[in-house]
Image: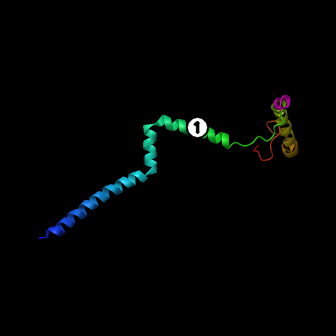
Amino acid sequence: MARDPQTQALIERLEASRRRLGGEVVALKARLNVPAQIKRQVARRPWAWFGASAGAGLIASRLLRRPRRDKRRKGVVRFLVPALLALTKPWLKTLLLREIQRRFVHTSSIPSNSKDSGTRFPLSKP
């Protein structure tokens, strides 16, 4: 089919515009792909990104920390309270276990011909 030169020139111009537009669309997609850009930047300069993230974390931890609640606990009290709690913890556990056994373990429900003479919890199997 024979076309006049003016139509042929317009068709060639249109095809060239389509090719150029296709290349620009691909380039635009690459520029707008933020996760891929970040991956490329991290791959190029990992130490700079590591330093920047550590610095940002340090700044955020300083800016966003909670204020101290009690500024009066100083000196001996600051040392003694945790130490006393640590020392009394075994005694408190024993006391609590004895109280639980006294209240919830019934020794009268254990048969006298039991193999062991110790107490059992009510739901344990003989």
Question: Which amino acid, by three-letter code, is at mark 1?
Answer: Gly
User: Compared with residue 50, is residue 123 higher up or lower down, i.e. above or below?
Assistant: below
| Most frequent secondary structure within the magenta stretch | helix
User: In which quadrant of the rendered image does the C terminus lie?
Assistant: top right
- Residue 75 belongs to the span the image colors magenta: yes
- Residue 110 belongs to the span the image colors magenta: no
With 110 as the anchor, is 7 left or right in this view? left
User: In which quadrant of the rendered image does the N terminus lie?
Assistant: bottom left
> Which is more toward the observer, 86 or 61?
61
Which residue is depicted at the point 14% across and 70% down? 4
Q: Which residue is mark 1?
A: 55
Q: Is residue 28 visible?
A: yes
What x and y, as percent, mark residue 76? 85, 28
View extreme (left): residue: 2
Q: What segment is highlighted magenta in the picture?
A: 74-79
With 63 as the anchor, is 116 left or right in this view? right
Which residue is depicted at the point 67% across and 39% down? 62
Which residue is depicted at the point 77% across and 40% down? 68
Which residue is depicted at the point 43% across and 39% down? 43
What x and y, as percent, mark residue 55? 58, 37
Question: Tag count in the figure?
Answer: 1
As helix, strand or loop, the secondary structure at mark 1 comes to: helix
> Which is more toward the observer, 9 or 123?
9
View extreme (front): residue: 6
> Which is more toward the observer, 28 or 86?
28
Mark 1 Cα within 10 Å, few/some/many (few <14, many 20+)? few
What x and y, as percent, mark residue 66? 72, 43
